[in-house]
Amino acid sequence: MILHRLARAALITGLAVFVSACAGGIGSGNIFAKRGSIPTEGQLTRKERADAQRAANAAANPDRVQKGSTIWDLFSNADDPNTTVEVNKYIWQASLEVLNFLPIESVDPFTGVIVTGYGRPPGGGRAYRATVYVQDPALDARSLKLALQGQGGASVAPETVRAVEDAILTRARQLRVRDSRL
């Protein structure tokens, strides 16, 4: 009899813990309430940006609120097109290859930004740093924005910027041709 009561108490306690874990607790709610104001894009972690994007999508499309997921969702192609990466992979890869002599400081494939530190090109005397912005999924010159800066904040000649952009776009086209042969 005592064993029966003890088992029932353990079952009720386990169910209470399970239900309270499903409620969300401390971590639920507005992610911006912790900071006191709406932060800029650079202050958010990747998870917080994804959560904010999902919340904005749910608010914009209340009829498409995602229900619970199952194991069968792994085999379906139900990705939300609003959360896919919109960066041209050839320009992205070509930028990394052409500027491989520069140390990478930050990379964000979701926004298409590559920021490098200062480095000297092979056979060159000046040190440069670059910021690359791939803003469109098309393999087009308008998709690539490049900013070069000399050491000490010195400006870089527009011809140099144009030459690096041309090298990146040429390498991107080569990568695309190589992939089309597969």
Image (cartoon, rainbow, N blue to C red):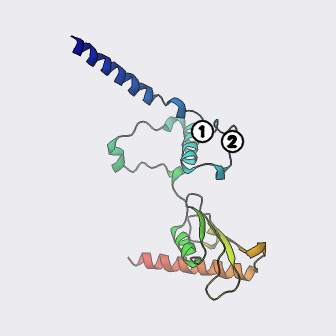
Most foreground residue, 75 or 14? 14
Residue 69: percent from left, percent from top:
39, 40
Q: Secondary structure at mark 1?
A: loop
* Location of residue 95 (image quadrant): bottom right
Q: Is residue 1 left or right of residue 54?
A: left
Residue 161: percent from left, percent from top:
70, 78
Picture layout, residue 127 above or below residue 48:
below
Most foreground residue, 104 or 13? 13
Report the amino acid beneath label 1. Ile
Residue 5: percent from left, percent from top:
27, 13
Task: Please name the residue that numbered disc 2 is placed on.
Answer: 38
Q: Is residue 77 visible?
A: yes
Residue 19: percent from left, percent from top:
41, 25
Considering every residue shown, the one lying at the far left of the view is 1
Picture layout, residue 87 above or below residue 33:
below
Whether residues under marks 2 and 1 lie with C-beta atoms below 8 angstroms apart, the answer is no
Task: Please name the residue that numbered disc 1 is placed on.
Answer: 31
Q: Mark 1 packing: few (<14 Cα in 10 Å), some, or many (20+)?
A: some
Most foreground residue, 8 or 166? 8
Report the amino acid beneath label 2. Ile
Q: Is residue 178 left or right of residue 132?
A: left
